[in-house]
């Protein structure tokens, strides 16, 4: 399942770039790179596939650095050894985050009927809703420039018809007219991925995030894919384990830190 999880991530990060001008995809045997055309390490992504063949990927790293664009390098634990880590470090790449790669067999899913009174969860269908979704993602970065670039990305995305991206499904959860939680599923060629599960700070510990998660699981179950996958931070690990997700290993993120 480890490679299936990576494949869903690769398909997800390159999906929009396949359709929008100004975004570039470099798909090589040893790596996949997506340049979103903005200085954003959220959407400029390199996925390491085979770090034994490091030279082509390092050339792509150098291209981003020369361009002045921040980016994130994602590597699955099984592809990394000490020699690879040393070479990444020599190019200024610092290990910044670790996530758990996880999956669940949707045919064996045991759903819970979580309910938060007044919470309404809907799939995004309009430009305004997508911009609201983008603002919530952007706000996670506070006053940092990354937040402004993330919102610009969603502005560009919202300029295209939403039916151009049927596999990318965004959801809003509203309570008393306020957006309090969001989430995304991406229906890949083999698995369905759960992404962007965020709950507003003022509405945590009220079951809202779990209700959105259960909704995404239901949508995933109806997607005609057997397995759902995700990459979990330590903060969200408990909710996923309780739902029946299994761990397959670590996913490491590297960035250039000045």
Image (spheres, rainbow, N blue to C red):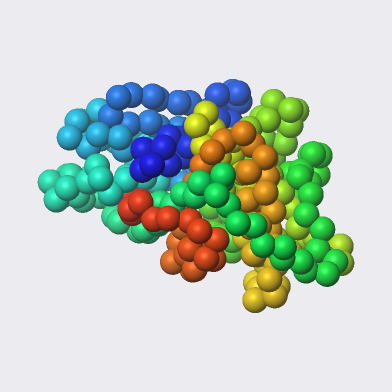
Horizontal side of 231 relative to 51 (left or right) equals right
Q: Residue 112's spot in the image, x, y percent?
A: 67, 62
**Relative to residue 22, is residue 69 depicted above or below?**
below
Looking at the image, which is closer to me, 188 or 65?
A: 188
Q: Nearer the viewer, residue 207 or 258?
A: 207
Left or right for 54, reference 215: left
> Residue at image x 50%, y 32%?
190
Q: Position of residue 221 (x, y in %)?
A: 63, 43
Q: Where, quadrant-wise, is the C terminus in this rendering?
A: bottom left
Whole-percent x and y of residue 24? 48, 26
> Which residue is pictured at 68% across the width and 71% down the height?
207
Tell me the residue at 67%/49% (across/down). Answer: 218
The x, y position of residue 120, in whole percent, is 82, 58
Residue 67 shows in this picture? no
- Identify the residue at image location x=46%, y=49%: 103
Q: Quadrant of the N terminus?
A: top left
Q: Is residue 41 above or below residue 161?
A: below
């Amino acid at each position: 399942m480890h490679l299936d999880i990576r494949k869903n991530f690769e398909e997800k990060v390159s999906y929009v770039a396949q359709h929008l001008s100004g975004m570039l995809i470099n798909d090589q045997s040893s790596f996949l790179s997506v340049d979103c055309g903005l200085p954003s390490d959220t959407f400029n992504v390199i996925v390491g596939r085979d770090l034994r063949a490091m030279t082509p990927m390092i050339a792509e790293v150098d291209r981003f650095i020369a361009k002045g664009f921040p980016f994130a390098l994602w590597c699955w634990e099984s592809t990394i050894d000490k020699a690879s880590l040393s070479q990444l470090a020599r190019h200024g790449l610092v290990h910044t985050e670790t996530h758990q790669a996880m999956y669940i067999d949707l045919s064996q899913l045991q759903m819970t009927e979580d309910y938060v009174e007044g919470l309404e969860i809907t799939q995004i269908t309009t430009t305004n809703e997508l911009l609201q979704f983008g603002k919530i993602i952007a706000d996670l970065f506070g006053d940092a420039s990354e937040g402004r670039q993330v919102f610009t990305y969603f502005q560009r995305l919202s300029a295209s018809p939403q039916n151009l991206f049927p596999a990318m499904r965004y959801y809003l959860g509203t309570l008393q007219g306020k957006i309090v939680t969001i989430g995304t599923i991406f229906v890949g060629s083999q698995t369905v991925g759960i992404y962007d599960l965020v709950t507003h700070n003022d509405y945590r510990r009220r079951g809202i995030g779990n209700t959105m998660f259960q909704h995404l699981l239901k949508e995933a179950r109806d997607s005609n894919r057997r397995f759902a996958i995700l990459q979990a931070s330590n903060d969200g690990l408990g909710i996923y384990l309780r739902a029946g997700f299994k761990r397959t290993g670590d996913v490491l993120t590297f960035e250039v830190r000045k």
